[in-house]
Amino acid sequence: MRRIETGTDKLLADVEDGVARVTFNQPTKRNALSLEMRAALPKLLQSLQDDPEVRVVVLTGAGTEAFISGADISEFGQQRTSPESRAEYDRQGADSAWLALEKPVIAMIRGFCMGGGLLTALQADIRIASDDARFGIPAGRLGLGYGFGGVDALAQVVGAAWAAEILFSARRLTAPEALQAGLVSRVVPGERLEAEVGELARAIRDNAPLTVAALKAALREWRREPARRDLARVAARVEACFRSNDYREGQRAFAEKRRPKFTGT
């Protein structure tokens, strides 16, 4: 296992056998998303994108109580009150770094996944939750304004009606409700969560990296308005797959009835 330096012990990252594990590490506050974590995340995501060993990224929270319980409310008075401080807080976000990450991301969710934690989980391509997970956006109970970006990210996944219920009620959804709403793709017993996420991560890792990246690019463009889709970019990635050594390796492995060994070239 190889540790990646993040600049803070509140955000941990390790790489083992092609799978990077990013851990939000503030268990005494149920992994509340602090400014320190937010500041470290863009650089970490860029390093994961640039790391040729990393093929899949798994996001999780330390301990068993929470994935991320939300933003660190103790910082709100100083960081999210004046227009200037709110603008600076927003600039610390990692939206552009998430967009630059072309590798598949799985969120492994146990316990509370609230507010900023839910928005972080929505950055993942796949979300798998334990049966004790709880989801929600408590903005309505805190009196804070909720920007369009967060509303859009939620509605893109669950649709307008579920987004309205989640946002207007500010209530906590159970794991089965999250599955029904489409927030997660799978709910598993807590004791099976690590095993099932690990199995999926390894299955993705063993597939052709260029193909997976092309598929992720296509899914991202699909979520855009048709007029804003960059289909030429997707087509170029598809063409790169056909020109790759991995395409030839896939054909050889099929003919030889063996597992392919993809290199991402």
Image: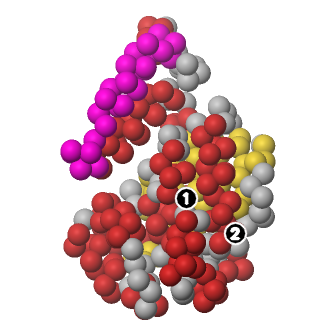
Image quarter for residue 92? bottom right
Image quarter for residue 15? top right
Whether the residues at callouts 1 and 2 have beta carbons within 8 Å, the answer is no
Q: Residue at x 38, y 56 (%)?
A: 185
Which quadrant is home to the C terminus? Answer: top right
Question: What secondary structure is found at the residue carrying circle 1?
Answer: loop
Left or right? Give the position of 52 relative to 80: right
Left or right? Give the position of 139 relative to 34: left
Left or right? Give the position of 126 relative to 264: left
Q: Position of residue 182 (x, y in %)?
A: 32, 62
Look at the picture and state if 140 lies above or below 65: below
First in sequence, mark 1 or 2: give its number: 2
Q: Which mark is residue 264?
A: none
Q: Which mark is residue 36?
A: 2
Q: Nearer the viewer, residue 95 or 173?
A: 95
Q: Residue at x 47, y 69 (%)?
A: 118
Question: What secondary structure is found at the residue carrying circle 2?
Answer: helix
Q: Position of residue 157 (x, y in %)?
A: 32, 60
Look at the picture and state if 88 lies above or below 145: above
Task: Give the residue pinned by disc 1.
Answer: 94
Residue numbers of the magenta segment: 224-248
